[in-house]
Amino acid sequence: MNNNLNITIIQSDIIWENIDKNLSDFTEKIKNIDHNTGLIVLPEMFTTGFSMKSKDLAEETNGKGLKWMKQMAADKNCYITGSMIMHEKNNYFNRLIWMKPDGKFSTYDKGHLFRMEKEDMHYKKGKNKIIVKINEWRICPLICYDLRFPVWSRNKGDYDILIYIANWPESRKEVWKKLLYARAIENQCYVIAVNRIGKDGTGISYSGDSMIIDPKGNKISNTEPYKDNIETVSISLDELNDFRKAFPVGLDADNFEIIK
């Protein structure tokens, strides 16, 4: 059995608050991705940028963004993930969609809202993480500011890959990079990190610095900061399991309980 997984990360600019233009742009980017990829990872709020206009930009469950993700996943016969502004039961969410090739999907609502930009005043926070699967791979997808909270990200032996999708500003890019390496090492997992580039409508600049890191803390991708780029990297579940078996630090991990 082949336990390798090909993951494609898309580092891109995002047109400010323009859903149609962003969907069109990402359609063109995805069009040329090899059909052998198993997962395509898009940035946080890939249809709008990190906007606080939740009421104006939110989509319903049957909205164009979700329909687009279903179409892309079907066309490429792979999984696709990214977050969008979603409306449900009089609440607004920064919601990650985990779309399967068959059109079925799971969701994760951002657990830590970035109060410095008043995200907590415009969105409702999520209370539960999700673990999703691709074949034998177990995956925990998270969003941007979640990265700063190691307890929320902590591996209790329930995942093999951590995903962070983001709109993480250039001014804190060193924090972004250092925390990503830490999460890979402390959780003995692969980390997939996809951040946007360009400048948003509020004047904030983004460097990207998207990357894939192995469980030993080595960067195994080649995406350069500030550049529009699509990169596919193959990762090995056998190598991960061999490393965990040879260096079983999880056996000495502390027990804890998360209270939200």
Image: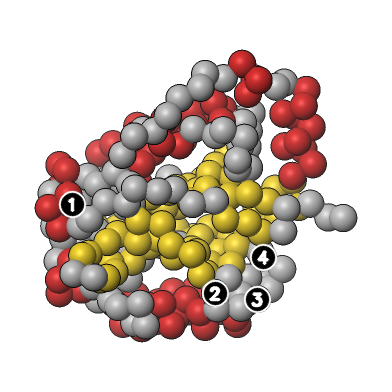
Q: Is residue 233 above or below residue 62?
A: above
Picture coordinates of residue 47 (x, y %)? 32, 71
Q: Residue at x 57, y 19 (%)?
A: 253
Q: Residue furthest top?
A: 252
Amino acid at circle 4: Thr
For marks 4 and 3 on the same chain, the one whose residue lies earlier in the sequence:
4
Residue tagged by mark 3?
Answer: 77
Amino acid type, label 2: Lys
Q: Which mark is residue 119?
A: 1
**CA separation in Å, label 1 and label 3:** 34 Å
Task: Identify the element where label 4 is drawn.
Answer: loop
Where disc 3 sits, the SS reads loop
* Location of residue 100 (image quadrant): bottom right
The reply to whether discs 2 and 1 touch (Cβ–Cβ < 8 Å) is no
Number of the front mark, 4 or 1: 1
Residue 76 at what x, y percent from top left?
Answer: 62, 77
Q: Quadrant of the C terminus?
A: top left
